[in-house]
Image (spheres, rainbow, N blue to C red):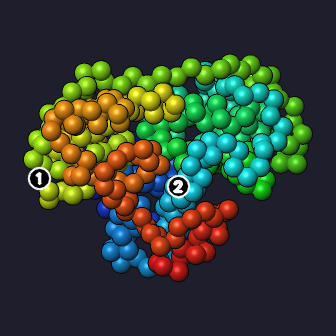
Amino acid sequence: MIPVFETNFAKIVERVEAIDPIKYGKTRNFINGDVTYLSPYISRGVISVNDVKNSILNRGYKPYQVEKFIQELAWREYFQRVWQAKGDFLFSDLKNAQDGVSHYQMPSAIVEAQTGIQAIDLSINELYRTGYMHNHFRMYLASIATNIGKAHWSAPATWMYYHLLDGDLASNTCSWQWVCGAFSSKKYYCNQENINKYTGSTQVNSFLSKSYDELPELAVPQALKEAHPIDLTTPLPIEASSIKLDSALPILVYNHYNLDPNWRIDEDANRILLLEPSHFKMFPVSELVVRFIINLSKNIPNCQVFVGDWSEFKRHLFNSGASLRELYFKEHPITEHWEGNKDSRDWMFPMVTGYFPSFFSYWKKSERYL
């Protein structure tokens, strides 16, 4: 059962402290496995992968005991490094042109949770209800959409990102490309037997009731043939269009990937969550996601919300008598056009930078610093 995603910071810290990294390593691929449900807070920058790693190691676990757990944290950091290195090219086929594409639209059966694969359809409805989908289901769904349904990864990846509380453009985009072979050396396939094993379902005679040798040659199932363009919009809060600034104080600017309540916590400062409509037009998110972001921002002392692009915010700042000299934000690909002073993110492996063509080349260099 997917838990309610608390937005109170103290509750989030309790969830971090409750992690059992050994059980996680053994059971994480099962739908009822001992997963952490921390991804929404990591993606939104409320906590960092480094925070989680340190919490585990400070409890006495040795790195070799919890290597699988730390590797999963490192995957997130690796995807961020890919985005950092590749920029907007992240949103194109990264390594290989996706093979066998029939269309660039969204399979209707996925949107309607009518694929005919019972466990998948249940997980889609859970995604709509909770904003969360187990990582193994994400891989299944991506494989069904791209490798079985022959859709290009871009539209279904956009649809999934729209609904995810833990929507992270780097992780989501790279993962979809990994499944369909655009960011990997081979495509990922799942069959009904594998889905039954990890979800506890017992379905038989579906279009996935095939051997792995048969799946690459499978014709597009009837259920996946209908597709349509996606049209998604972000319901940003229209009332959050004006803020009050004290020009005598520094200005700390947050975004939906940096909602860290401990960032410069000891400073007396203006604290502003900036939501840029131009960004959300390119990368839309659902009302559930917007509400989650706003509620997480309430952990930040006296945080005000400003909806407007950087140019509008800067104009408001100057009209208030404030200056860019005392404006601070955390570096991130979505803040490249911001002006002021950049703080670093809390990286797990800050010394491992640049582009690595695979996770394991990145991990080989990173693990020596554990």
Tell me the residue that label 1 is attached to: 268
Could you tell me which residue is drawn at 22 percent across and 37 percent down? 317
Tell me where residue 276 appears, x and y as whole percent.
38, 33
Crowding at dot 1, Cα within 10 Å, few <14 / some 14-19 / many 20+, comes out as few
Nearer the observer, 24 or 288: 288
**For residue 46, side relative to residue 193 (left or right):** left
Nearer the observer, 72 or 351: 351
Q: Earlier in the sequence, mark 2 or mark 1?
A: 2
Tell me where residue 282 appears, x and y as whole percent.
52, 31
Q: Amino acid at mark 2?
A: Gln
Q: Amino acid at mark 1?
A: Asp
Quick check: 94 above or below 313?
below
Residue 316 visible within the image: yes
Tell me where residue 147 appears, x and y as whole percent.
77, 39
**For residue 341, side relative to residue 89 (left or right):** left
Placement of the N terminus among the 4 image quadrants? top left
Secondary element at tag 2: helix
Could you say which disc has been placed on residue 84 in the image? 2
Q: Quadrant of residue 225?
A: top right
Could you tell me which residue is drawn at 47 percent across and 54 percent down? 35
Q: Are marks 2 and 1 in contact (CB under 8 Å)?
A: no
Residue 38 visible within the image: no
Tell me where residue 27 appears, x and y as whole percent.
54, 58
Could you tell me which residue is drawn at 47 percent across and 56 percent down? 34
**For residue 43, side relative to residue 81 (left or right):** left
Could you say which disc has been placed on residue 304 in the image? none
Secondary element at tag 1: loop
Could you tell me which residue is drawn at 31 percent across and 55 percent down? 341
